[in-house]
Amino acid sequence: MTVTTIAFVGLGAMGLPMAQNLVKAGHEVRGFDLNREALAELEKSGGATAASAKQAATGAQVLMLMVVNAAQAEQVLFTDAALDALNPGSVVVLMATCAQAAVQNLAQRVAEKGHRFVDAPVSGGVVGAQSGTLTMMVACETPTYQMVSPLLQVLGERVFHVGQTPGQGAMVKTINQLLCGVHIAVAAEAFALADKAGLDLALLLEIMGGSAASSWMLQNRGPRMLDDDPEVKSAVDIFVKDLSIVLQTGHDMRAGLPIAAAAHQMYLAASGRGDGKADDSQVIQTYRAMNGVKG
Amino acid sequence: MTVTTIAFVGLGAMGLPMAQNLVKAGHEVRGFDLNREALAELEKSGGATAASAKQAATGAQVLMLMVVNAAQAEQVLFTDAALDALNPGSVVVLMATCAQAAVQNLAQRVAEKGHRFVDAPVSGGVVGAQSGTLTMMVACETPTYQMVSPLLQVLGERVFHVGQTPGQGAMVKTINQLLCGVHIAVAAEAFALADKAGLDLALLLEIMGGSAASSWMLQNRGPRMLDDDPEVKSAVDIFVKDLSIVLQTGHDMRAGLPIAAAAHQMYLAASGRGDGKADDSQVIQTYRAMNGVKG
């Protein structure tokens, strides 16, 4: 199969630059999103656009989904009938962060229609999407992987084929988000305690950033925890959602995840006090509020 | 004050190489420990030894304590009367991991005897102690810091003067251990879940070690989590102790620390099932036992 047209649905903060990177790499991309500004941006970059997901998928060989969650993927594929519009034997690439069980369900229904399914969640945020340096955790059969790998290499720098069965990619992403979500929350727990103790947080960040206490998230989010109103790079509500997926997965598998559960409570509380749209570093404000620390 | 003799009490896995590094740097070191083998090792390296803490301290200008906890420091200083044996106006350097309140209490009692007190906990483990690359979190008045700084630079690569008041070093170390203890436990939580899901843990470690999910501890302890009987580099019971200090500090300060508390339960359970002396990476076995994962 030669890929001549990629249908790309979901042109958000990550999806748009990903679609643009595919255009830059010489692929014919037909994008769709409900946001007309995003469609205009894609056209400016040389991409084609469509009036619906179904129209984008019509005659395409690959349908990439960079939507918010599994429910949106189901809507696009089945309710909006994009799946039926694809050429026979096409490939659906789902890159949203979803629970393993939801991915398994979608993969089975896509296979029943005679198409291939690639479970390919990504990590690296807007910066990674823009620079084409995402980490991709890909699960599908090897022949399908070989077919889509050149496209994925355009989007990501670290593309891992983690298994043959859709859902395994989602599980790796789930593990990834468990760690990321806890690392941010525990940094906030530690820094708010330090704040209450009157320590110099900038010096603390310098010490911790170079010690055994360091994490990628500590180094990345730590500086924004020292700022009361930082730019929103990734919102609190993302981890409300992603740790929900983690805990739902633990529930489905009957696995107790006490640390992830404790961290999730803090994001829920942060969202509950009105910080859901704030940068996720601001979960520290929940600790400050909770423990009586001046902000 | 010219330092001519350093009394060094506590020649354990970290204390012995630290004392040896001071000898190598040209200082006169008089060591004491209840372990005679450690005394013999120090003598082999050119250090002097003493028959008691008091004898080691007699006429010394600096007394360094690398004992297990605050209770041992109190025993050495007061019960064993090492403090009274020091020259007038000497400096006590406490490098053990202790709760802030305990350090504040010891510092006050040392000051009442006319001596100076340096709160200087360390991070970096046996490897850092041997290579003289410890991170040191030092709290004392600036003139005292300037006096002991040349000695501390022998022991550590990253020596931070974090505050003027003894107890502030202990607080920084407490924050450090909160992060370290949680990072190990959450890596175990994540890897045991991945194990239950049938993922390839070595590949997972490669992916996570280079993604936003990474931490120093994930990279350091992760490989030992894949090993059922790794060499003991640092025992589970160290974090039983250190997270106790974290939670006691939270209790003293009236600060809820939900993530640290959840992590502590896992180390307690690990110790309870007989793994207290095992490498701290083996907290993963508690998750495996708890969640029904084959080891």
Image: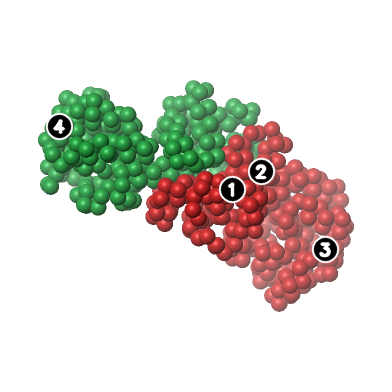
Chain colours: A green, B red
Say yes or no: labels 3 and 2 on the same chain: yes
Marks 4/2: CA–CA distance:
59 Å
Q: Secondary structure at mark 3?
A: helix
| Residue designated by label 2 | B246
In the rendered image of this protein, does residue A269 appear above or below residue A139? above
Label at residue B53: 3
Can residue B217 be seen by looking at this rendering? yes
Counting from the top left corner in percent of width and height, residue B236 is at 62, 54
Please name which of the two marks, 1 or 3, marks the residue nearer to the observer: 1
Please name which of the two marks, 4 or 2, marks the residue nearer to the observer: 4
Counting from the top left corner in percent of width and height, residue B105 is at 79, 45
| Residue designated by label 1 | B181
Q: Residue at x 48, y 26 (%)?
A: A271
Counting from the top left corner in percent of width and height, residue B138 is at 67, 50
Q: Nearer the viewer, residue A149 or B142?
A: A149
Amino acid at pointer 3: Ala
Mark 2 neighbour density, 10 Å: few (under 14) some (14–19) many (20 or more): many
Counting from the top left corner in percent of width and height, residue B119 is at 71, 50
Q: Quadrant of residue B179?
A: top right
Marks 3/4: CA–CA distance:
84 Å
Amino acid at pointer 1: Gly
Q: Nearer the viewer, residue A71 or A32?
A: A71
Q: Quadrant of residue A125?
A: top left
